[in-house]
Amino acid sequence: MSGVSMVGVTKTYGQVKALDHVSVDVCEGELLALLGPSGCGKTTLLRCVAGLERPDRGSVEIGELDVTGVPTRDRPIGMVFQNYALFPNLTVRQNIAFPLEVRHKVRREIDARVDELLELVHLTDQADRYPKQISGGQAQRCALGRALAPNPEVLLLDEPLSALDALVRGRLRDEIRRIQQLVGITAIYVTHDQSEAMAIADRVAVMNAGRVEQVAAPADLYELPATQFSAKFVGSRNAVELAVHDGRVGIPGSFHIEAPSGSNGHALAFFRPEDVVVSRGADGPGMAARVELKVFLGATTRLHLIGDADGQPIAIFGDLPSRQARLIDEGEMVRVDVDPSHVHAFPI
Amino acid sequence: MAVNPILTATGQRAAGGVRLSRTARYLFFGAVLLYFCVPMAAVLIYSFATRWTANVLPDGYTLEWWQATVANPRIQSAFSTSIALATLTAIIDIAVVVPAAYWSRVRNARIRPVVEVAAAVPFALPYVVIAFGLMQFSGVVVPQYQGTFALLVAGHAAIAFPFVYWAVDGAMAAAGIERLSETAEACGASPFQTLRRVVLPNISPGLVTGGLLSFAASFGEFAMAQIIGRGLDTVPLWSAEMIRSYTDTAGSYNRLAVVTLLTFAVLFVLSAVVVYWNRGQTVRLLPGGVASDKGGGR
């Protein structure tokens, strides 16, 4: 097993820079998620590692080996695609055996390995079915087994869950994680779903417009977004534009923090709905705000609040435990407070 | 004709919109059946008729025409020439078109418009024009091949390849061959392994259909055989000669009927094989096919 290094990878399609000097390292045995909106270059980067795209500049290393010029079929990779790219003319067993057969392994060896993998991905009972006869989740498990069959050094997953329904998605996500850790294989996982990335990855690389914005462990990314884009993309956050006074920004009656360097009159402050403290009554700490709307989300209830920042209305979402929120009516005046340590401000 | 929207068990209007009533459906089906079968039946009866002029049915029946035709060495040779010609045409077209279609899909999408225009030309130009051009051209470049079997094979391959192209290209689109190729590559397969183990099995319905269509196009082709195949005997050329040299006493129309039926038999058997083959493949491979627990029909 070995890690992966992408160094200064650049890829242009006509005028569009799909990848702009991207450098990311994936450690041995680690699962790195490439997270970003569609068109951010995450899939292109994965395809560069697979060799399905050739970067214009930069290099890709797997272990100690520079594989930039190596054709896909000679790279030590296994890949799972977005749509179940199983071979429809082969059964589940034959699909998993395929990478071993093209490597001219001995029949007995192939059979033993395939049995082992069928066990691993829980498809022993479906072994002799054709892809059309199994479910989407089973198909992706089969694709995973096929990708792992030749004992690759790196597992590449290109949005493997996006074609599945929500229930199967969560289960298969945990299943993929379990198998990846069991095998101890280095993995790169492309997704546009931030909660999926958070749940499965050791580290998440947030990508935007062909660049890597931030690489961090899920908890760090959640708590300490390094850029405005990461803050906006990861988790649902309040994004409030605030005026800078004497090098500080804040909400009157609530927090004030140091304005970010480079801010010019205004700054964008991000904080999470669950960090908003809402108290009843017109007096007390915090900013006066009116409850516009209550949205029941189960365990929590989201309040749409309109606050008054020195005459400027600002819109804030606040999440409360639903039992607490039941006491608050729509249209009621409340106080809104935010702990300054949970606020991240970026220059506009 | 009564048009009756029939509701399905779930209460929704059946897919496909308007449905005919049961009687109307049988009537329509019967009309179509007659349209196809009456001419075939007439030819069949004619091939057994002694004399068939004045009455609804022939004056008498005989096996003479069948015996004479099947035993006729000229007809035997015309059939073997035509079958060889059509088989070679189909093989050459498949061998040329499959890699080209694959390349235009997987490697170089820019050549697609060129290939598509080329695959439309033989439909747009009359075969007589193509044949005449080919005769002129071959007269300049390879005069020694004029009137040979080889040149006719080349000509037929040129006019029949669009049948293979459209069938194969459609099968590749349906199979999502680009994705499957990438997957095979990521599995470590060489281009040859990809072609043999992934591409060909997954486009087999298109291959078989395209092969049959080009075979049939070549088997029945007359204009080009007439112009650049002078001196050769193919089934259509022999048939044309029979029509031209019509004499009532020689029973030439009866023998023509026998040859027509034999031609039909060759193509019918091939079509039946194709339909039988494709049914199993379609169920297993193509989106929309119905999955069965037996793992496909074939």
Image (tube, rainbow, N blue to C red):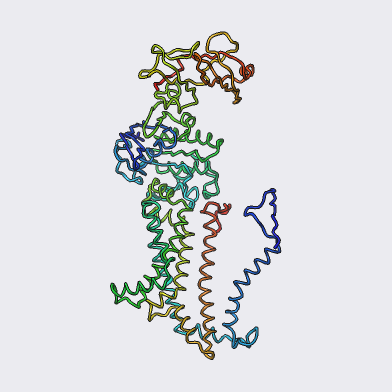
**Closer-to-camera residue (A231/B255):** A231
Q: Position of residue A290 (x, y in %)?
A: 58, 17
Q: In the rendered view, would you say B69 is above or below B121?
A: below
Horizontal arrangement in the rendering, residue B103 relative to residue A335 (left or right): left
Report the quarter where the C terminus of chain B lies. bottom right
Question: Is residue A116 something that shows in the picture?
Answer: no
Nearer to us in this view, B250 or B55 = B55
In percent of width and height, residue B167 lies at: 46, 60
In this view, B75 is above or below B268 = below
Viewed as shown, does residue B235 lie left or right of B60?
left
Query: Which residue sits furthest bottom?
Result: B249
Mark yes or no: residue A123 visible.
Answer: yes
Residue B64: name its quadrant: bottom right
Q: Quadrant of the N terminus of chain B?
A: bottom right
Residue projecting furthest to the front: A311
Front residue of A72 and B3: B3
- Figure quadrant of residue A147: top left
Q: What residue is shown at x 32% (from left), y 34% (from top)?
A: A21
Question: Is residue A285 shown above or below B92?
Answer: above
Number of on-image labels: 0
Q: Residue furthest top?
A: A284
Who's the residue at 46% across and 55% down the image? Answer: B202
Image vertical order of residue B201 relative to residue B235, above or below: above
Measured from the top left, where is residue B50 in percent x and y? 59, 88
Percent x, y of residue A39: 42, 37
